[in-house]
Amino acid sequence: MTVTASQPTGFQPAYERHDWSSAFRNVGVELSDVPLEPVRGTIPPELKGTLFRNGPGRLERGGQWVHHPFDGDGMISAFRFEGGQARLTNRFVRTEGWLAEEQAGRFVYRGVFGTQKPGGPLANAFDLRLKNIANTHVVQLGDQLLALWEAAEPHALDPRTLETRGLSRLEGLLKPGEALSAHPRFDPGHHGESRMVTFGVKAGPTSTVRLMEFATADQPDGVRAGDLVADSHHSFKGFAFLHDFAITPSWAVFLQNAVAFNPLPFVLGQKGAAQCLASKPGEAGQFWLVPRQPGHHAGARPLLLPAPEGFVFHHLNAFEDPATGEVVVDSIYYDDFPSIGPEVDYREIDFDSIPEGQLRRCRIDPRSGTVQSEWLEQRCCEFAMVNPAKQGLNARFAWMAVAERERGNDPLQAIEKLDLQTGERLVWSAAPRGFVTEPVMVPRLTDGSAEEGAAEDRGWVLVPVWNGARCATDLVILNAADMTEQAVLELPLAIPYGLHGSWSATA
């Protein structure tokens, strides 16, 4: 595991498929407050707080495997750091579907990404129930830890024990079955207080987006952490597939991908709902700039502008350029919607047959309605983030999961730090037998607050790594500035590749 300079373009990947695919398995145990000792390096004593991670932890039941790992049941991991020590707790989210299938010993729900109940199309036809699998993200809001899945309500958990408290409708703010995004953004205090900004979408021929903002800390005026402080609804023509969005002080930025949805194969039991999505060849997407209520454009109508061709799951960040008046959005673009067909085993996927994600910057001029774009990183990448204090601002640095080679699609095996001003790159690699998931950048704090004038890259990057050599998961701590390895913790767990995670300095 090394920090390297960029390899030549012709560099060939060095990994074995069985090392990569060996991560797809069930989590077999739940642990409580187990101490973790570094096998290399030391845990920084200043690192204090909890890393929460979410992802599919159950991929097989009764001998049947899910068709896509995104259909796996949510499993939360909590890594607690204090005084140079670390402790691990993990729990499955006790959703209604998880409990029912644990009792039955088989799948009793269809999966959105193609997993079918036993019995073929006849057994699945006209069963349109969605199993809330709570497997996509986990964030703390007030005294609740929320396990998120974007097609339904969140589940509330105890932040310490990870015990499931039950389905949460956020004190009645959500109607039964109302979706809440699995990808909130955290405003670090652009308008005087920190906020969690999130959304829900009701998709159809006309799609409606509900934009919500919650206080993340108690305020002197009596507003409590978790209280709703802004709420608005906006309707747009066309079917909306929205996983992520970005924020600036004035805008919530959405990208409506150019996709169509044909529900008939889902209704007839032939495909999962997500498999019924298809790109519209030759059509570009559309940016929706929705005014935030605390921003300079509060009360104005949303702006609709053309987006480059391609498909976007995730955005890195957005900011407003005071020199030009442009809204700048950095996103990970795919040439097409990456999907796994009904007859394809995801463990045997041909990486060369699916598009890779690449980081692209779009400069949106709200006055002229024009959009210009450029590539920031054409290396295969995903799960990019900036220093949380720079969310919505012009950040200099980004950290992201990348492929080992510079061109072509491969599993993610390295973490890259990209200087967005100079283009300089530092890469920490887990190859040949390690495979990374989403990195989380943790700023270094003093007495619970950021140091005045502290460098933007002062802190750590925490990343789970699948270790193919021992068929288990490691947690690696990197120095965010120079990407050197600080500590490696070998977990007594084998955790499949996860989705999203968050850091809480208070949990």
Image (cartoon, rainbow, N blue to C red):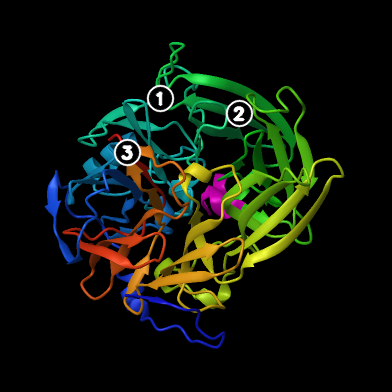
Q: CA distance from mark 2 to mark 3?
A: 29 Å
Count neighbours of disc 2 (C-alpha within 10 A) and say few if under 14, some if 14 to 19, many if 20 or more: some
Count neighbours of disc 1 (C-alpha within 10 A) and say few if under 14, some if 14 to 19, many if 20 or more: some
Residue 454 drawn in magenta? no
**Where, by quadrant of the figure, is residue 142 drawn?**
top left
Q: Residue at x 42, y 61 (%)?
A: 481
Amino acid type at mark 1: Ala
On screen, residue 498 above or below 6: above
Q: Nearer the viewer, mark 2 or mark 1?
A: 1
> 70 or 452: nearer the eye?
452
Number of labelled discs? 3
Q: Where residue 163 appears, x then y in whole percent?
A: 22, 34
Q: Residue at x 77, y 36 (%)?
A: 303
**Screen quadrant of the N terminus:** bottom left
State which tag comes first along the sequence, 2 or 1: 2
In the picture, the disc for residue 210 is 2
Q: Where residue 25 appears, x then y in whole percent?
A: 28, 62
> Is disc 3 placed on a helix, strand or loop?
loop
> 209 or 49: nearer the eye?
49
Left or right placement of residue 302 versus residue 476 in this view: right
What residue is disc 3 on? 505
Amino acid type at mark 2: Arg
> Is disc 2 placed on a helix, strand or loop?
strand
Residue 270 drawn in magenta? yes
Q: Which residues are magenta?
A: 266-276
In the picture, the disc for residue 217 is 1
